[in-house]
Each structure stands twice: as C-alpha cells, then as structure tokens.
Image (cartoon, helix red, strand yellow):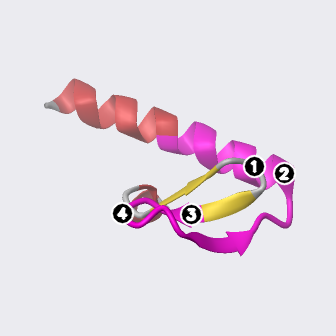
Amino acid sequence: MSIFYKWIYSDGIYYYNRSTNKKIDKVTSFEESVIYEIGRLIYNKQIKNIE
C-alpha cells in the first residue's frame, strides 16, 4: 500500500490526488480512511527517519 501514500490522501469524506488535490472517489468506510491515513503518517515518519 505504501505506493498509494505518495499519490492519495483522505479527509475522511473523499480520497484525493495529492498532486492535483482533485477528488478521486467518495470514502465508503470512514474507519478504512482513518486506518489509511494513520498508515500514511507512520510511513512518512519512517521515511523521514531513514533520510
């Protein structure tokens, strides 16, 4: 899933393209979008610690 973290983010209502900020799709499960965002935050923190 880490490949998606570079291109997609969520506000809990919609998924967005990070480079254009355009809506991709409506979130079907708020809980899933929260888990996705937590994973993205953890992934980004790990990448920063490596650099």
Closer to the chain start, of discs 2 and 3, is: 3
**Residue nearest the observer in this picture, 39 or 23:** 23
Residue beneath the point at 39% across and 64% down: 3
Q: Are marks 2 and 1 in contact (CB under 8 Å)?
A: yes
- The correct choice, above or below, for 31 with respect to 26 in the image is above
Mark 3, other Cα within 10 Å: few <14 / some 14–19 / many ≥20: some
- The correct choice, above or below, for 36 with respect to 19 in the image is above
Tag 3 residue: 16
- Inter-mark Cα distance, 3 to 4: 9 Å
Tag 1 residue: 12
- Mark 1 residue element: loop
- The correct choice, above or below, for 9 with respect to 37 in the image is below
Magenta span: 16-40
Closer to the chain start, of discs 4 and 2, is: 4
Q: Nearer the viewer, mark 1 or mark 4?
A: 4
- Inter-mark Cα distance, 1 to 4: 18 Å
Q: Nearer the viewer, mark 2 or mark 3?
A: 3
Q: Is residue 34 left or right of residue 23?
A: right
Q: Is residue 15 magenta?
A: no
- The image shows residue 13 at horizontal and vertical percentages of 78, 55
Residue beneath the point at 53% across and 69% down: 22
Q: Is residue 35 magenta?
A: yes
Q: Are marks 3 and 4 in contact (CB under 8 Å)?
A: no
Mark number for residue 30? 2
Q: Is residue 6 left or right of residue 17?
A: left
- Inter-mark Cα distance, 3 to 1: 10 Å
- Residue type, numbered disc 2: Phe
- Residue type, numbered disc 4: Ser
Tag 4 residue: 19
